Image: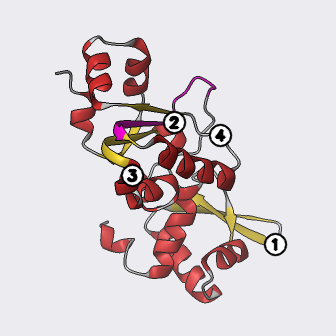
Amino acid sequence: MNLGDLLISKVRVKLLEIFFADPQELFFVRDLVRKTGEEINAVRRELAHLELVGLLKKEPRGNRLYYWLNKNYSFYPELLRMIAKSVGLGAEIIKNRQRIGRISQVMFSGKFAKKEERGTEDVDALVVGEVVLPELAALIKAEEEKSGKEINYTVMSSEEFLFRKRRRDPFLLRILEGERIMIIGEEEALVKVA
């Protein structure tokens, strides 16, 4: 089992982006053909390969064959991190990094990246640095409109972040204690107490 099993064709990449953009969802073949814009035989071939290596599971229901992600797959966490940076809000933040300001760290909560149910108090994204708030807000608003879900995010300057981390601020600790996916910056720098 190696990454070459997964990342060698454009159809496979499109399928991975679709599955990881909504890891809880089940997809049927014709739906995946529409979403990828690829030939049905190419989609079926890649689905068969992804099932063979263990990333996907399948089940027939009525006259449709449904596929979904196997969350026990060895490389599932790593693929989730990669896809979070290449599609959706993560990709937009990386692409527009210069316009947003001098960002040192961006992290998404694990629940947000996995599209799991989140509480109203949960923070989906933490952005640290000198941020141009209207630019960041516009990206987040566009993603909210696309997904139909509100994104709860927190922005802190580098100084405020370090101050709150040193003081063991309960709000910040709650964010840092949860599962996270780094979009920009190093995880060690995010959680290390100075």
| Residue 120 falls inside the magenta stretch | yes
Determine crowd level at label 1: few under 14, some 14-19, many 20+ residues with C-alpha closer than 10 A.
Answer: few
N-terminal of the pair, mark 4 or mark 1, is 1
Do tag 1 and tag 2 residues touch (Cβ < 8 Å)? no
Look at label 1 and name its amino acid.
Answer: Asn
* Residue 18 location, quadrant: bottom right
Would you place residue 61 above or below residue 116 in this image?
Answer: below
**SS of the residue at dot 4?**
loop
Q: Which residue sits furthest right?
A: 62
Look at label 2 and name its amino acid.
Answer: Asp
Residue that numbered label 4 is attached to: 150
N-terminal of the pair, mark 1 or mark 2, is 1
**SS of the residue at dot 3?**
helix
Q: Which residues are magenta?
A: 119-130
In the rendered image, residue 62, in percent from the top left (x then y), is placed at 83, 66
Please count the marks in the image.
4
**Of the two numbered discs 2 and 3 in the rendering, the one whose residue sits closer to the viewer:** 2
Look at label 3 and name its amino acid.
Answer: Arg
**Marks 2/3: CA–CA distance:** 15 Å
Residue that numbered label 3 is attached to: 81
In the rendered image, residue 23, in percent from the top left (x then y), is placed at 57, 52
**Marks 4/1: CA–CA distance:** 35 Å
N-terminal of the pair, mark 3 or mark 1, is 1
**Marks 4/3: CA–CA distance:** 21 Å
Residue that numbered label 2 is attached to: 124
| Residue 2 falls inside the magenta stretch | no
Residue that numbered label 1 is attached to: 63
In the rendered image, residue 32, in percent from the top left (x then y), is placed at 65, 73
Determine crowd level at label 3: few under 14, some 14-19, many 20+ residues with C-alpha closer than 10 A.
Answer: many
